Image (spheres, helix red, strand yellow):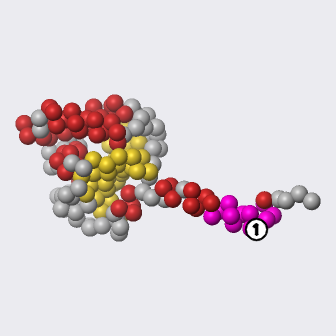
Amino acid sequence: MALSISTSPTLRLVAWLWLLMAAPSAWADWRAELPGAALVGQGNFTWFGWRVYQARLWSPAASVSWEQPFALELIYRRELSRDTLVRASMEEMRRLGGASVNEARLAAWDGEMRKAFVDVQPGQRITGLYQPGKGGSFYVDGEFRHAVADTDFARAFFAIWLDARTRHPQLRRELLGLNETNP
């Protein structure tokens, strides 16, 4: 008589328990680091009419500020290389930082982003978690990728979307849940 795994409740239970113990990191994502986070706002980033990604801003507080943690989730709709992501981020961080950010610091930030980012495919998510006083952590498709323990980097990076001088003020308003009557 052959033993069938599909009919053996004991073997199914053992297999299920083994999977639970073997894959705890599959469940650990940025949400565990930001309890009580709710969607603050969302919007689409387009470039010459092409939808590049959908952005979502998550926070435990209704009003987002630099004094409390938040998460920025980007869901890509286009294939983009890591180099493209890093280059575009660096350009904006340089523009927003001006003379306060020197080239040596920017070079270090370039290296950190290369560790945090991947070549993205449509449907892929990169989420950045801003943590005041600590820096930022990055997750790709919910899995931890890299932490940057530099508060200046974290502020400069998230300013790309949230600073009042962003190149995309409509997306900023949508992320922050602002409308024309509540700027």
- Which quadrant holds residue 84? top left
- Describe the element under mark 1 as helix, strand or loop: helix
* Residue drawn at point x = 17 percent, y = 47 percent: 152
Q: Is residue 120 left or right of residue 87?
A: right
Q: Is residue 4 visible?
A: yes
Closer to us: 88 or 110: 110
Q: Residue at x 28, y 59 (%)?
A: 70
| Residue 140, image x, y percentages | 42, 46
Quadrant holding the N terminus: bottom right
Q: Residue at x 50, y 55 (%)?
A: 26
Crowding at mark 1 (Cα within 10 Å: few <14, some 14-19, many 20+): few
Q: Is residue 40 visible?
A: no
Q: Where 136 falls versus 12 (above or below)?
A: above
The residue wearing badge 1 is 9
Q: Is residue 89 above or below residue 7?
A: above
- Magenta region: which residues? 6-17
**In the rendered image, the vertical position of residue 70 relative to residue 105, given as above or below:** below
Seen at 42% across and 35% down, the residue is 119
User: Measured from the top left, where is residue 99 in percent x and y?
Assistant: 7, 36
